[in-house]
Amino acid sequence: MASDMTVVPFSERENIREDRFNQVWSEELNEVFADVAKYYDKANNVASLGLWGWFRSSFLSMIHLESGHKALDVCAGTNAVGIAMMKKQPDLTVCAIDRSSAMQKVGGKRAQQQGFEIQSTIGDVHKLPFPDESFDVVTLQFASRHLRVIEVFEEIRRVLKPGGHFYHSDMLRPRTRFMEVVHYAYLRFCLLFTSWIFNSGSAARGCKKYFVNALSAFYSADELSQLLSDLGFSDISNKTHMGGLLGFHKAMK
Ligand SMILES: C[S@@+](CC[C@H](N)C(=O)[O-])C[C@H]1O[C@@H](n2cnc3c(N)ncnc32)[C@H](O)[C@@H]1O
């Protein structure tokens, strides 16, 4: 599925992704995250063979934060990125937006337990309920595969202040066909294993195929850089790990 996607222009690819996945995106995912919220962080730690914390700290190391900055974490989930940003720069204002109240409930509690306050909005990120040019920093981690990327990136650019930065972290479509085959096999195994040990509900179990299909129709690191540039971002850089499986992007408005 993936290799033929590489020749498809981005706007068309977005249409294909939407045709294939819209039903999951709009009807099933919220149930999946309601189900996994209570064990989301533990499951990621298991699935990443203990590397989850390292993923986050590598991502955080590229995020430039200054005293008084206002940051928005898009698809914030359990607030892992927001909390890490506040640990790095405690006088930040951090806003979080996510459609899943279950994920945000876990995230709000976690932030509070560590003495941080994160302003939570429950909503769909395809329309960000914030004024133009209101944030110095916007982050988006591990969620773009579930989104109409062009629409969301345009919204992110709108709410960023001029000179503000967008930081993106995700599993990306690997660089080679070999890495794709290996990674998708590993993902299938992980999804089975974690749904077994964490006793996932039917929504999460039913979405196992989707998670691999969504990745195989997603963007590689270079494609994502090109997409950001097409949308008007500048000073774009990316850093990849594990043969392009994991990628961090930084882009300026
Ligand atoms: C895999 S989790 C990532 C959470 C967090 N960013 C992290 O790195 O741990 C994906 C998150 O995206 C959210 N999400 C997916 N589609 C969304 C949408 N259209 N609008 C808002 N949130 C969405 C889900 O509710 C979920 O919390």
Image: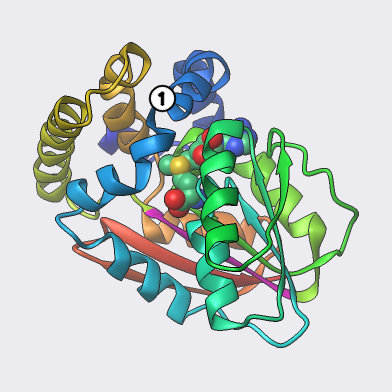
Majority secondary structure in the magenta region: strand
Q: Is residue 63 left or right of residue 68?
A: left
- Picture quarter with the C terminus: bottom right
Residue at point 44% right, 81% down? Answer: 61
Where disc 1 sits, the SS reads helix
Q: Residues within 10 Å of mark 1 (few under 14, many from 20)?
A: some
Asked if residue 59 is positioned above or below residue 155 in the image, the reply reads below
Query: In the rendered image, which quarter is residue 111 located in?
Result: bottom right
Going by the numbered disc 1, the residue's amino acid type is Asp
Residue in front for this viewpoint, 110 or 144:
110
Can you identify the residue that label 1 sits on? 35
Residue 162 position, x and y percent, is 82, 74
Q: Is residue 46 left or right of residue 156?
A: left
Q: Is residue 153 left or right of residue 135?
A: left
Residue 19 position, x and y percent, is 51, 17
Residue 177 position, x and y percent, is 15, 45
Would you say residue 9 is visible in this rendering?
no
- Report how many numbered discs are placed on residues in the image: 1
Would you say residue 25 is visible in this rendering?
yes
Q: Is residue 203 magenta?
A: no
Most extreme residue toward the right is: 131
Residue at point 90% right, 54% down? Answer: 131
Q: Is residue 166 magenta?
A: yes
Asked if residue 186 is positioned above or below residue 1 in the image, the reply reads below
Residue at point 58% right, 18% down? Answer: 26
Residue at point 59% right, 74% down? Answer: 86
Residue in front for this viewpoint, 231 or 95:
95
Q: Which residues are magenta?
A: 164-170
